[in-house]
Image (cartoon, grey):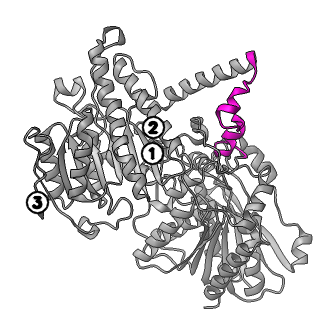
Amino acid sequence: MGSAAIGGTADRPQEVIVVRYVHCSPSQLGATMTWPSGETAFVTGAASGIGLGIARALAARGARVALVDRDGHRLAAAAEELSAAGGSAVAIELDVSAEGRWDDAADRAEAALGPISILVNNAGVISGAPLTGTTFENWRRHFKVNVDGQFLGMSTFLPRFLERGGRAHILNTASMAGLMPVPGVGAYSASKFAGVGLSLALREELRDTGIRVSVLCPGTVSTGMTAAEATSGHPAGANPDRVGEQVVEAMEAGRFVIPTHGDFEPIVTELHREIEQAFRDTDERHGPDPSVRMILGGVDPVDRMLRSGTGPGARPAAPDETRAVPMIPSRMNAAPAKGDTMSVNPPRPPFDPELEAVLAALADRFPASMTAEMIPRLRESDTRTMTDEQLAAADLTRRDVTIPGFRGDDITVSVIARRDHRGTGPGIYNTHGGGMVAGNRFAALDQCIPWVLEHDAVLVTVEYRLAPEYPDPYPVEDCYAGLLWTAGHAHGLGIDPNRLIIAGPSAGGGLAAGTALLARDRKGPALAGQVLMYPMLDDRNRTASSAQFDGIGVWDRSSNLMGWTALLGDRRGTEDVSVHAAPARATDLSGLPPTFIEVGSAEVFRDEDVAFATALWRDGGQAELHVWPGGFHGFDMMAPHTAVAHAAVTARNAWVARIMEA
């Protein structure tokens, strides 16, 4: 541990105070670090409340932190706390509304900790008074701190960020009162609406740079600012440390709006509905205004929305077009659970050129965003079965068997084998895809049939029950029941029980992983391997890839939220979700069979699948991971003629061959 004196001048003796700071490696903080590890943050309002919570979360992830506040005493204590915990911190006393002090404070922070790359404009004031009882002095005080302070921070650090290039992030703290009217705090609410507007404008201006912008809109947080806390001495709201963790996770994922309290969503949504209705009324009465196209740079406003990635059939934005802010969707289809936030399509990896052409041709048949209202149509269009003629052409046989599923209810499995199958050999247990809400046991069997033909394997494919009519745990428990039946009847089916693997794509991949965890936890049946093809593993949707693919590709973020909501209902995104339903939540992946995982680089599931493979290795497991460049979700099935699909199928079949012939 070291110390540094960051002293003031003779005429400003208290502007900056003496602090101690340390530099430590991520291993000293007890975690493997990515962003923001190694970055330097400048956090205003950091002596307490949300600011301190964000500072703690950043420091815990390996960032160096300049804590900035007017309260010198509490500021010093906060800096000492971070230093004692092994962080790198410097305390700087600053009134954020003082225009002439920002450059000096920034220079001193960078002299102590290095170039700033994260600006957190968090300092704020609040006082309770209706607008009719607000003095101009009180009004100006709110805007000087809550709006002018953010503008001054932005104008101080933006030139530095742009000159240095690379990644940087600006977070402005607004409030839920900046998204909806809150009676009794008129000046505060108006200033927070201004903060949201400032952030929106800044994001649009910086969209072609490496600088990201986020706006935090917290509900009631225990900050010590409210009258209830001042008079009672008890916290009145969420824990600011929990909020800090949530904020840093959302920043890491590149999200723009960061709410903290999902309970306010219906109120905000209703306000947006009122605005939408006003636009519809205006259009019906007066028709479209040609000047809008001119204002938007010659881009039709509807086309602008589609290219922003905010609706079905969305198209990639052209370089000279701007992205629109997505409207808040209905609760059923894609509303954030508590802790979730909405994304605004941060930079994303490109699609493979061959696949991009296929994606454009499929746009009408496969809209990027699926909604709950589309579930019946999805099911009607997916009535696939295997006819006797098809089986005979492939020299295969099939028999359907009714077996007991979850709670003893009847479910069906189909057993498919070569007509000349004799004795016992490898077995394949298949769990089909369909986002938890669609599909049947014959879906995507083209992925498994080659293994039956080449290795004389017997395939058992299960008709598990679908959400939302049969929510968790029905799907995974039906799958486990089918696995129990398969293993229990292995010899009669012509399967060597020591050579049985489980396989599934998409939701089926997630169910295969969940079934394998159930088999481990319940001491059987044993599995020789699991083939997880772009599996659906994590209900929380907090990864960078989840934010990147919203309104574009196949099975985007909104579709994923819909599928998980159908399966889990209000439990989605909460702590009340089992590892068997969402395997990414498992903290122990030891004792699982050898695993093959594949995923495209240009799809929602990329990061959770990579993380699952990493966790398998961490816990001593064997895993083979393939991330196919430019692959969208299910590209091997939708574009089997492309080079990347050929490579993916070849790698998958080679792994299965090694397992089956071992």
Q: Secondary structure at mark 3?
A: strand
Q: Nearer the viewer, residue 392 or 304?
A: 304
Q: Is residue 451 magenta?
A: no
Density class for disc 2 (Cα within 10 Å; few <14, some 14-19, many ≥20) is many
Task: Give the CA separation, mark 1 to mark 3.
Answer: 33 Å
Q: Indicate the position of residue 439 as horizontal and vertical percent values.
A: 72, 56
Q: Quadrant of residue 587?
A: bottom left
Amino acid carrying label 2: it is: Ser
- Locate the C terminus and report the quarter of the image it occupies: bottom right
Q: Nearer the viewer, residue 448 or 252?
A: 252
Q: Nearer the viewer, residue 535 or 270?
A: 270
Residue located at (35% from left, 19% from top): 187
- Locate the N terminus and report the quarter of the image it occupies: bottom left
Specify which label sits upstream in the sequence, 3 or 2: 3
Amino acid carrying label 1: it is: Val
Q: Quadrant of residue 87?
A: bottom left
Q: Mark 1 touching mark 2, by CB under 8 A?
A: yes
Point out which mark residue 199 bears: 2
Q: Indicate the position of residue 500 as horizontal and vertical percent values.
A: 62, 80
Point out which mark residue 213 bears: 1
Amino acid carrying label 3: it is: Ser
Q: Quadrant of residue 95?
A: top left
Question: Is any atom of residue 190 visible in this view?
Answer: yes
Q: Is residue 246 above or below residue 276?
A: below
Q: Mark 1 touching mark 3, by CB under 8 A?
A: no
Task: Give the CA separation, mark 1 to mark 2.
Answer: 7 Å
Q: Magenta span covers which residues?
A: 286-313
Specify which label sits upstream in the sequence, 1 or 3: 3
Residue located at (24% from left, 51% from top): 107
Point out which mark residue 3 bears: 3
